[in-house]
Image (spheres, rainbow, N blue to C red):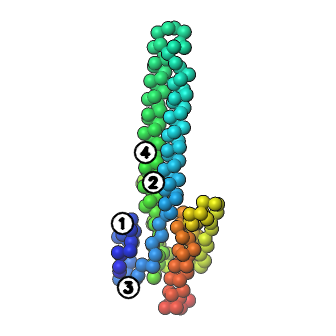
Amino acid sequence: MNTDQLSPVGKKFLNMIEFDDNESIVREIRKDPFGLFMIYFSGVFVMLVIFFVMVLGGSMFDASEVTTGSGVAAESVNSAIAAAGFFLCVLIIIVTAIGAFLYKNNVVLVTSEKISQMLYMSLFNRKISSLSIADVQDVTVRQKGIFAHIFNYGTLTIETAGEQSNYTFTFTPEPYEAAKALVGSHEADVARHGN
């Protein structure tokens, strides 16, 4: 099996799943970079809000306005606000980094025989599912919103036969091309093995 076309995440995922020697990789589907941008943008936005709240909160306790004249109470309040703001900013950086890691490590591999999906729900909660390509009933693409159309990403839903739940993969780049690859792999499998 030629794995040169896979990203490092795809290669790592390939080692977790059993693939036959005669299987070929049709497509690796990763999340669109726009979603990663949104994760980083949200983290920076929240940090800026905290920074402005700290600046505005600190100016409310200006030492020259304290009636005691010593300014000790105002300095201690400013120090507490600064410490709380710093702690919150570090926490937001950590949460943003974890969100980016989880986002970047979600992958779907489409082969000539199966579809395998690895989704990270949290650092310690990973879901790996595989589905025979013959069990694909329908593939649906949904692009909702102006950004999805501008940046050409969407939600890919693979409806399955039997009791397995449907596969849903959000922020799929070039979703119509991914759907064509899935349907093409399914049709090739039907041509080889029949219904």
Badge 1 marks a residue whose secondary structure is helix
- Image position of 188 with respect to 121: above or below: below
Badge 2 marks a residue whose secondary structure is helix
* Whether label 2 touches label 4, CB < 8 Å: no
Q: Which mark is residue 94?
A: 4
For disc 1, the marked residue is 8
* Whether label 3 touches label 2, CB < 8 Å: no
For badge 4, the amino acid type reads Ile
Q: Distance from label 1 to label 3 (Cα)?
A: 22 Å
Quadrant for the C terminus in the image = bottom right
Quadrant for the N terminus in the image = bottom left
For badge 1, the amino acid type reads Pro
N-term mark: 2 or 4: 4
- Image position of 122 with respect to 56: above or below: below
Q: Residue at x 49, y 79 (%)?
A: 132
For badge 2, the amino acid type reads Ala
Residue 23 % position (x, y): 40, 82
Badge 3 marks a residue whose secondary structure is loop
- Residue density around tag 2, few if under 14, some if 14–19, many if 20 or more, within 10 Å: some
Q: Residue at x 45, y 79 (%)?
A: 26
N-term mark: 1 or 4: 1
Q: Distance from label 3 to label 4 (Cα)?
A: 43 Å
For disc 3, the marked residue is 22
- Image position of 36 with respect to 191: above or below: above
